[in-house]
Amino acid sequence: MRKLNVLIAGSTGYIGIQLIKLLIKHKNIKIMYLCGNSSIGKKISHFDKSLKGTKLPTIKKFRKGLLENIDIIFTALPNGQAQKISKILLEKNTLIDLAADFRLQKASDYLKWYKKKHKAITNNKKSIYALPEITKDKVKNFKIISCPGCYPTSILLPLIPIIQKKRLINNDIIVDSKSGYSGAGRGVHKKYKNQNLYESLSAYGVGFHRHNSEIFQELKKYTNFKIDLTFTPHISPMFRGILSTIYLNLKNGISINNIYSTLKIFYRNQNYIKILKNDTMISTNDVINTNSCFISVCKTNNKKNIIILSAIDNLIKGGAGQAVQNMNLKFNFKKDEGLK
């Protein structure tokens, strides 16, 4: 089988760099083009010294002509840019987007949460929101694959099985998530220039963070009840990783062991989801530089309430790794190819 040719648009950001690091180890892939705007003509090692010595193309400006000998386009671009690219795709091209351009099914929701009109509504209807352990082989039927956001990944993976099995009272959920500052992209130091990112913890987007939209959208697929979820994200003084703390009210007769069993059975054949013993304290350090999601179910002093801890690396499981997982599913590659 020939190697598939890949183009990465937005190759110099944190997610783009991480994607390159995974794909250069993938035996079924050849990176043909790296694209950027302000970085044209530079080597990718200029942005990450660990890539020095790798045989990678210099950075080009993206243009339609490049798509003629490309099988897969990865887009890690500002919101709105992948929509434009989707309108010039050739029949042979598959687009895997790591931004939010195709995450929301309704164009009206995209306008509401991202304050922009969707520029590829027809393509949006033909795309799939692809959380690999949930959507699995369904990606094979789509040429536009949308990867979930990093926070939603850490939240949806533990919640979907529990909501699907109707284990909660009124689906009343509180989520407190803390992320490394890499989640805000390379511009994070300019955006938060008045805050000491290395020594402070900051809440933001309280009650109205954009990722609320995709969390609600996906959870609604698994319940007839109204979802009542409060989500608060924080930037923490670390470079990478997400720890989500999820507070749940259980139905009468449902115990912490029921929740553990629900998760353990649901993910029994999924290598990248680790359901740990009840009350295991987990940290981002457990998952850094891996494509794993660690989940722990913890008791409280009230038997009707539990706390779930969920940890991922936002740049891998919450970004580039998830994109590679979806690609492997789409093209029948080994599930762990490029992710070992």
Image (tube, grey):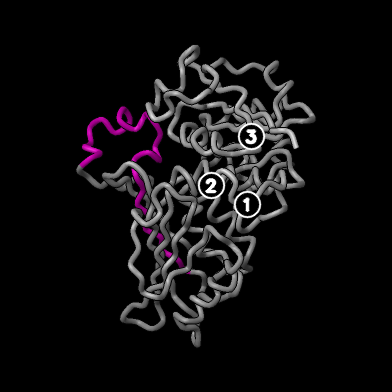
- Does residue 191 belong to the magenta stretch? yes
Write the residue at 51% across / 29% down. Answer: 78
Residue at 52%, 17% in the rendered image: 59
| Position above or below: 15 against 210 | above
Q: Position of residue 323 (x, y in %)?
A: 58, 43
Residue 27's tag is none
Residue located beneath label 2 in the image: 339
What amino acid does circle 2 point to? Leu
Give coordinates of residue 236: x percent, y percent.
Answer: 29, 47
Q: Amino acid at mark 3?
A: Ile
| Magenta residues (range) | 172-198
Task: Answer with the quarter of the image where residue 6 lies.
Answer: top right
Q: Residues within 10 Å of mark 2 (few under 14, many from 20)?
A: many
Amino acid at pointer 1 = Lys
SS for tag 3? strand
Mark 1 residue element: loop
Q: Is residue 137 left or right of residue 130?
A: right
Q: Which badge, 3 or 1, is on the more N-terminal residue?
A: 3
Residue 239 placement (x, y as % from top left): 32, 41
At x 49%, y 35%, the residue is 21
Above or below, 84 relative to 250: above
Percent position (x, y) of residue 257?
Answer: 47, 81
Of residues 220 and 142, the one nearer the viewer is 142
Image quarter where the N terminus lies is top right
- Write down the residue under mark 3: 29
The residue that label 1 is drawn on is: 335
